[in-house]
């Protein structure tokens, strides 16, 4: 967990909550097929972060309302 300020810019109706492990969950609600959303996260690195490992990671989970396989994706970039 970093020492700087983390800020999110979310689409209307979306919510963000911090988890006990220092990760965040963003809930978007229902999306229609082909709908796109943009979520922007910014982090201001502070001198106190110098001895820390900062990782930029994203994991997407969804529920397919028509049945079948649920969509997922994951990406992780050490900074």
Image (cartoon, rainbow, N blue to C red):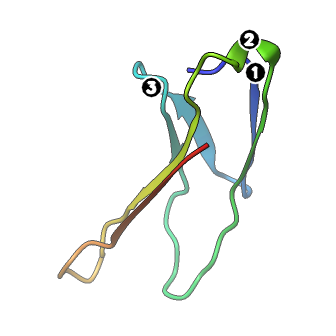
Residue 30: percent from left, percent from top: 49, 66
**Quadrant the N terminus occupies:** top right
Q: Residue at x 55, y 56 (%)?
A: 28
Circle 1 packing at 10 Å, graded few (<14), some (14-19), many (20+), is few
Q: Residue at x 62, y 16 (%)?
A: 51
Mark pair 3, 2: CA separation: 22 Å
Residue 67: percent from left, percent from top: 19, 80
The residue indicated by pointer 1 is: 4
Q: Residue at x 80, y 15 (%)?
A: 47
Circles 1 and 3, Cβ within 8 Å, touching? The answer is no
Q: Is 67 situated left or right of 19 in this image?
A: left
Circles 1 and 2, Cβ within 8 Å, touching? The answer is yes
Which label's residue is closer to the chain start, 1 or 2? 1
Label 1: state its secondary structure. loop
Identity of the residue furthest to the front in this view: 51
Say if 29 sits above or below 56 in the image. Answer: below
The residue indicated by pointer 2 is: 48
Q: Nearer the viewer, mark 1 or mark 3?
A: 1
């Amino acid at each position: 967990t970093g020492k700087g300020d983390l800020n999110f810019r979310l689409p209307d109706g979306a919510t963000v909550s911090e988890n006990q492990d220092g990760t965040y969950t963003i809930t978007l609600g229902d999306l229609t097929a082909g709908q796109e959303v943009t979520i922007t996260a910014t982090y201001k690195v502070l001198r106190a972060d110098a001895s820390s490992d900062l990782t930029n990671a994203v994991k997407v989970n969804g529920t397919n309302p028509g049945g079948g396989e649920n969509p997922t994706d994951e990406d992780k970039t050490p900074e």
